[in-house]
Amino acid sequence: MADYSILYSYFEHINRKPLMDEEREEITRFFKKSTFRKKTMIMKAGEANTLHYYIEKGLLRMYIIDQSGKEFNILFARERQWIGDLGTPAETPYFIETVENSKVYSISEENFHILYKRYISLANYIRKSYVFLQKRFVSILSKTAEENYEELVNEHPDLIQRLPQYQISSYLGVTPVFLSKILAKRSKKD
């Protein structure tokens, strides 16, 4: 049987009290734990998206592909974070792929709503995801690539260490060559 202790711990943290046995059983029944190798596609654009994902270990990216075939990373999610299309269960425009070997819990939209009603604090954590996405989109539209890179370095320095430069450049909406220029300019300042 899979170890769900990370997930139990998460629900105890957001609920601010230990889980009862029935709650543990329900969580175990609602979630499926999966292990994915690096570069595994777990959600594809055009599919009906019916799952939400909580990451125990690893790093995932959500991205789109534009009409010319260019990838744009929308967000990265790592340990103890949720990822998925918030428009569930509609057809999704996003892809989700593992950047590292990952252990992930998935839950159906239907079961997610049951837990959402039962654990009011879960709503607050999901709301934080919405706020992050809104800030991310505003940042993309209103700041320069250099400013967005500085924000990434300051707010998520661990991602800089875990991601290859081509993934970071896609996240910033610039070419790898332009990112190299940003990095060279930064190193001259230091």
Image (cartoon, grey):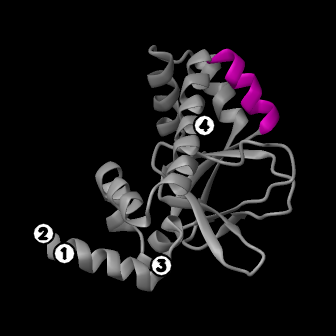
Extreme residue in the bottom direction = 177
Q: Nearer the viewer, mark 3 or mark 1?
A: 1
Please report whichever mark, 2 or 3, sits nearer to the chain's N-terminal start. Answer: 3
Please report whichever mark, 4 or 1, sits nearer to the chain's N-terminal start. Answer: 4
**Residue 111, magenta (yes or no):** yes
Q: CA distance from mark 2 to mark 4?
A: 35 Å
- Residue tagged 3: 166
Q: Nearer the viewer, mark 4 or mark 1?
A: 1
Across and down, in percent, residue 19 comes to: 53, 18
Residue 115, relative to residue 162: is it above or below? above
- Residue tagged 4: 130
Q: CA distance from mark 3 to mark 4?
A: 26 Å
Nearest the viewer among 125 and 42 is 125
Horizontal relation, residue 67 to residue 27: left or right: right
- Residue tagged 1: 187
In magenta, the rendered stretch is 109-119
Q: CA distance from mark 2 to mark 3?
A: 23 Å
Q: Which mark is residue 190?
A: 2
Q: Which mark is residue 1?
A: none
Residue 134, quarter of the rendered image: top right
Q: Secondary structure at mark 3?
A: helix
Query: Do callouts 1 and 2 mark residues in contact (Cβ within 8 Å)?
Result: yes
Q: Quadrant of the N terminus?
A: top right
Horizontal relation, residue 177 to residue 61: left or right: left
Q: Secondary structure at mark 1?
A: helix
